[in-house]
Image: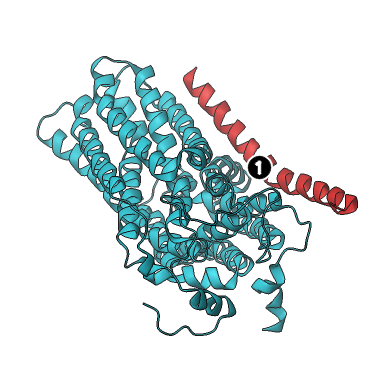
């Protein structure tokens, strides 16, 4: 059976880790999309 | 060295309860940074005006000389991945990621010094050689770790990391432009300062990945996963030693499969903007063409995740059959889109082509794992990346020289790429045939149980076939 304390610790680590890599990636993709849309106009 | 003992493989074995979903972000920390290589061209123009500032001065660097920076880096990527693959595999992912962070960040810092003293050889050494080693180490470092954590979905796992390599350019391109704008004054172009900032940012980001990464304990399996006891067709349960893999036809068939897929993709990747403007003169402006390139890059990135994840369900060989069959049709269709002046069809063809170009990179680690097992998949993947280095030379050369030959012989620019596209379609047919010949690795190449145990313990192994 999974330890609830370990599980909540994992959830926090997972959130932090995915946010750490997700923010720059999403920012980069949005920048590219914005530039592409500008170009199409 | 005791101070660096935290890098040792045994110090990275995950404690019970560790979530395997922490490994993809660790891998992304590395791949998002080294993916900057695809955006290096944003520095080309500013680097030609470091002395002249507003326009190139006679002593300024020439674009042709600057092109070598990227070429050296890609060549060293393949060479270092091939040479250091076994070192990466045996030392564990943290040591490799840590070293990659130092090389990649250090490469930027040395290049910044080169830009500051205006010596191109220092930039070749910094970004090209040291950065190239960082690229090679960083690219392969998380691959086998991901495959071990996700034995149930290895394609998806490696696809996520390798998608990061495609995504790195999206971050690096606007970041580089923004940083240069901050450091540039009317009397100075801030390339050196931008490289210092990027070197430090990338080093820190990659070190976070090295800190997060863990390897699973030997007896760990994901909850609910039942490892197959018997090998399925084209999916082995055995392991092949890294250099033994070189003696198998499967390795060389997959080498050609990757090389041909990348040659076709990389050849048109660098020419997509010029090609769209020449094929659709009056319909596609330079600005619109840059928008297309951005869109194609998104498909290149998305394809890495989507195709490699799909390969978990339809199999690696079938995935490559899709790339080669569909790719052949699409490459052959591109000249037709020009003849009927259909920009939309051209963009659609290219979008799918680039998704398969990225997908080829992302699916290949899982293909190697299916053929050669988990044990040395990272090192074997490193050896295979020499195919990328070769394709990096073949592809652009083929496209550029054939186009020039056609133009010199009176072919209108709008049709100058037709021969190239048919040739690329032909290369994909050869790739299809190579893929057709892939069979299970013969049992004589498999590591015996005693060899596998000795390798794990680091003891010398005798009697290897």
Q: Position of residue B312 (x, y in %)?
A: 51, 42
Dividing the picture into quadrants, the one containing residue B167 is top right
Q: Position of residue A20 (x, y in %)?
A: 72, 47
SS label for mark 1 = helix
At x 66%, y 42%, the residue is A24
Q: Position of residue B64 (x, y in %)?
A: 32, 51
**Count of numbered circles in the view:** 1
Front-most of B122 and B396? B396
In the displayed structure, does residue B411 sit left or right of residue B84? left
What chain does mark 1 sit on? A
Relative to B121, is B288 above or below?
A: above
At x 39%, y 59%, the residue is B384
Front-most of B138 and B242? B242
Q: Which residue in the protein does label 1 denote?
A: A24
At x 14%, y 39%, the residue is B405
Is residue B56 visible from the viewing direction of this image?
yes
Farthest residue to the front: give it: B230
Colour scheme shown:
by chain
Dividing the picture into quadrants, the one containing residue B458 is bottom right
At x 38%, y 44%, the residue is B317
Q: Position of residue B254 (x, y in %)?
A: 35, 53
Farthest residue to the left: give it: B409
Relative to B409, is A7 above or below?
A: below
Of all chains in the rendering, the one displayed in red is A
Farthest residue to the right: give it: A5
Is residue B65 visible from the viewing direction of this image?
no
Relative to B364, is B355 above or below?
A: above
Front-most of B191 and B360? B360
Mark 1 is surrounded, within 10 Å at the Cα level, by few (under 14), some (14 to 19) or many (20 or more) other residues, namely: some
- Shade representing chain B: cyan
Quarter holding the N terminus of chain B is bottom right
In the displayed structure, does residue B332 sit left or right of residue B155? left
């Amino acid at each position: 059976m999974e330890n609830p304390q370990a599980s909540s610790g994992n959830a926090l680590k997972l959130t932090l880790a995915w946010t750490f890599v997700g923010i720059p990636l999403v920012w980069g993709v949005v920048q590219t999309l914005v530039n592409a849309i500008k170009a199409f106009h | 060295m005791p101070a660096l003992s935290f890098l040792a493989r045994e110090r990275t074995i995950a404690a019970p309860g560790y979530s395997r979903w922490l490994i993809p972000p660790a891998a992304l920390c590395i791949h998002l940074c080294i993916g900057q290589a695809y955006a290096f061209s944003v520095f080309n123009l500013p680097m030609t005006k470091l002395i002249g500032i507003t326009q190139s001065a006679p002593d300024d660097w020439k674009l042709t000389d600057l092109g070598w920076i990227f070429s050296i880096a890609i060549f060293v990527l393949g060479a270092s991945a091939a040479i250091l693959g076994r070192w990466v595999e045996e030392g564990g992912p943290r040591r490799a990621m840590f070293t990659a962070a130092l090389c990649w960040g250090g490469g930027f810092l040395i290049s910044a010094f080169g830009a500051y003293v205006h010596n191109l050889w220092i930039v070749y050494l910094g970004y090209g050689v040291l950065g190239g080693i960082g690229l090679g180490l960083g690219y392969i470092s998380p691959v086998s770790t991901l495959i071990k954590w996700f034995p149930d979905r290895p394609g998806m796992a490696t696809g996520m990391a390798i998608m990061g390599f495609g995504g790195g350019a999206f971050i690096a391109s606007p970041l580089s432009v923004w940083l240069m704008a901050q450091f540039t004054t009317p009397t100075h172009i801030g390339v050196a300062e931008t490289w210092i900032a990027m070197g430090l940012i990338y080093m820190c980001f990659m070190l976070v990945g090295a800190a997060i990464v863990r390897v699973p304990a030997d007896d760990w399996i994901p909850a609910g996963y039942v490892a197959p006891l018997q090998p399925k067709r084209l999916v082995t349960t055995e392991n092949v030693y890294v250099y033994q893999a070189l003696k198998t036809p499967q390795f060389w068939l997959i080498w050609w499969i990757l090389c041909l897929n990348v040659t076709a993709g990389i050849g048109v990747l660098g020419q997509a903007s010029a090609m769209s403007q020449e094929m659709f003169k009056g319909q596609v402006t330079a600005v619109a063409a840059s928008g297309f390139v951005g869109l194609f890059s998104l498909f290149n990135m998305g394809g890495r995740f989507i195709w490699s994840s799909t390969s978990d369900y339809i199999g690696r060989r079938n995935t490559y059959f899709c790339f080669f069959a569909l790719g052949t049709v699409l490459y052959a269709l591109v000249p037709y889109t020009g003849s009927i002046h259909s920009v939309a069809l051209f963009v659609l063809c290219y979008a799918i082509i680039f998704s398969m170009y990225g997908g080829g990179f992302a699916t290949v680690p899982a293909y190697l794992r299916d053929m050669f097992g988990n044990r040395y998949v990272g090192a074997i993947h490193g050896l295979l990346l020499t195919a990328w280095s070769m394709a990096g030379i073949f592809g652009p050369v083929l496209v550029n020289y054939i186009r020039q030959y056609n133009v010199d012989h009176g072919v209108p620019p709008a049709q100058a790429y037709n021969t190239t596209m048919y040739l690329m379609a032909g290369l994909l047919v050869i790739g299809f045939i190579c893929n057709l010949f892939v069979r299970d690795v013969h049992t004589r190449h498999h590591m015996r149980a005693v060899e596998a145990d000795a390798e794990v313990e680091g003891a010398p192994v005798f009697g290897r076939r």
